[in-house]
Image (cartoon, rainbow, N blue to C red):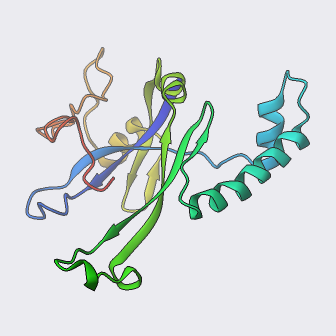
Amino acid sequence: MSVNYKLVQRKNPLKKDEPAKWYATPNSAKPLSPKALTRAATANTTTAPIELESAMELLAAFIPQQLQQGHTVNVPGMGSFRLTFKSDGVEDINKFNAGQMIKSPRIVFTPAKELKEKTLQGLSFENSGVLENKINYASLADYRKAKGLPTPAPGGSGTGGGSGSGGGTGSGGQGENPLG
């Protein structure tokens, strides 16, 4: 399965004096509507799309209730949801005030091992364009043409950082994107 990505130029906020680098970001398509999702998920099964839609609505109502009660919610085959937060500390336990000191509550989802394996197994990545200054170029070739950049030699895919940027990807820890 091939995942589409776009190249986006960003500066590392921790190294503002360094030149911006090109990073791959997922080119996410619009999500399916609930009806399209349930139809696709139940295709070739005996489950009716409306049954799946109803089950998903029940689960969506159940998970917040369980999290608020302090439970971790494990959805078999998908993963688990849990509530977490940050807290200020105090030296004297009697001075702890939960209302003022517990901050940034959030929900964390940890995918199940089988979901990760099914999703990540055999992945490949395909360039689907370049986004620069709010201009969306349909392909890396279109970007090069618009900017008057040379085309890589035959046999080169152009995805390995051969655009003269010096570092390509990988010089910052496996091409890590500092902005997420």
Name above or below for residue 66 compared with residue 39.
Answer: below
Name above or below for residue 21 compared with residue 68.
Answer: above
Residue 18 lies, in percent from the top left, at 9, 57
The number of numbered badges drawn on the structure is 0
Residue 110 lies, in percent from the top left, at 47, 42
Front-lying residue, 63 or 41: 63
Q: Residue furthest front?
A: 94
Image quadrant where residue 93 sits:
bottom left
Q: Residue at x 71, y 55 (%)?
A: 62
Residue 137 lies, in percent from the top left, at 45, 47
Front-lying residue, 101 or 116: 101
Q: Residue at x 48, y 27 (%)?
A: 113
Residue 105 lies, in percent from the top left, at 44, 68
Q: Residue furthest top?
A: 155
Front-lying residue, 45 or 150: 45
- Image quarter where the N terminus lies is top right
Q: Is residue 33 left or right of residue 180?
A: right
Q: Residue at x 21, y 58 (%)?
A: 11
Name above or below for residue 178 compared with residue 158.
Answer: below
Q: Is residue 150 left or right of residue 124?
A: left
Front-lying residue, 26 or 51: 51
Image quadrant where residue 161 sits:
top left
Q: Is residue 56 left or right of residue 50?
A: left
Q: Residue at x 54, y 22 (%)?
A: 118
Image quadrant where residue 176 sits:
top left
